[in-house]
């Protein structure tokens, strides 16, 4: 009776795998955020100003950042300011100016414009003092999920290694890389790390940007593992 029950459970699990595979093929378009990102990667990289191909993105100011402002010909206006929670800074003799989301070159232009009514063609220099250090987040089926400092050029596979590597339950053929492009849009890309490693070709291993999230999903076997009796796992185990 026990053997019959074990075989029955195993058959149901195999049928579940077949149904899941068939359903996934028929509903590819329904998983639009990920599937669309995979099929439209080349188009997005060509069209988006801040895509996955950008290697050296400029830092953008965030609330809490602090910087020094120096006026070469008018030192009496030199000052140190901090970006307030609402994204504004308060400038001497000018007032509040919104700067959150700007790069340093964009901030320089903003300050020159703000002081134009007071100073003729001011020469402004910016020195960042306190700012959010670059980081990335690793989540899902990795050894040590969490937030990590991003120091120098770091690729996706290197980030996974820093986070403890893949678990046995990971589906490393569909690793997701999420990147925030702006406040309304987060782009996603599916990376086949399994293929890159098996072919010993890391030319498509993307460099991470600050704020990126690497998510490693579960493989199908780990989802079905609770259906199998523990004593029979060795008979039916297959790596995906």
Image (tube, rainbow, N blue to C red):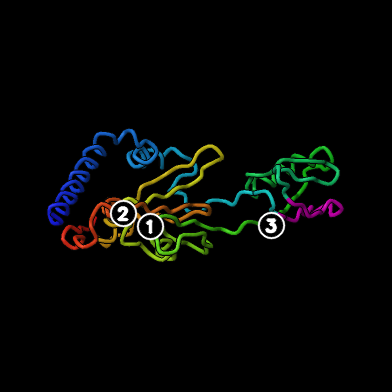
Relative to residue 174, is residue 230 depicted above or below? Answer: below
**Farthest residue in the front direction?**
1
- The residue sitting at 19% across, 63% down in the picture is 234
Question: Which of the 4 image quarters holds residue 161?
Answer: bottom left
* Residue at the spot of label 3: 128
Reading the chain from its start, which is encountered first: label 2 or label 1? 1
In the rendered image, the quadrant that contains the C terminus is: bottom left
For residue 40, side relative to residue 60 (left or right):
left
- The residue sitting at 73% across, 47% down in the picture is 84
Decide: marks 2, 1 in contact (CB < 8 A)? yes
Q: Is 12 or 31 nearer to us in this picture?
A: 12
Q: Secondary structure at mark 1?
A: loop
- The residue sitting at 13% across, 56% down in the picture is 3
* Residue at the spot of label 2: 171
- The residue sitting at 37% across, 38% down in the picture is 43
Residue 141 - label: 1
């Amino acid at each position: 009776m026990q053997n019959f029950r074990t075989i029955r459970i195993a058959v149901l699990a195999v049928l579940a795998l077949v149904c899941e595979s068939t359903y996934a093929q028929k509903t590819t378009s329904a998983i639009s955020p990920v599937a669309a990102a995979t099929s439209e990667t080349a188009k997005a990289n060509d069209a988006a100003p801040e895509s996955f191909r950008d290697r050296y993105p400029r830092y953008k100011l965030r609330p809490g950042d602090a910087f020094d402002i120096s006026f070469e010909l008018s030192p009496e206006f030199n000052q140190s300011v901090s970006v307030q929670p609402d994204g504004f800074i308060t400038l001497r003799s000018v007032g509040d100016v919104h700067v959150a989301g700007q790069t340093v070159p964009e901030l320089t232009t903003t300050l020159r414009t703000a002081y134009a009514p007071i100073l003729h063609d001011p020469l402004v220099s910016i020195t960042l003092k306190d700012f959010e250090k670059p980081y990335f987040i690793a989540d899902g089926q990795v050894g040590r999920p969490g937030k990590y400092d991003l120091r120098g050029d770091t690729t996706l596979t290197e980030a996974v290694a820093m986070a403890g590597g893949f678990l046995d339950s990971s589906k490393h053929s569909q690793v997701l890389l999420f990147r925030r492009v702006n406040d309304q849009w987060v782009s996603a890309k599916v990376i086949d790390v399994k293929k890159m490693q098996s072919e010993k070709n890391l030319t498509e291993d993307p460099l991470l940007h600050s704020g990126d999230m690497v998510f490693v999903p579960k493989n199908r076997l780990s989802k079905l593992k609770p259906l199998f009796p523990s004593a029979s796992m060795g008979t039916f185990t297959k790596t995906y």
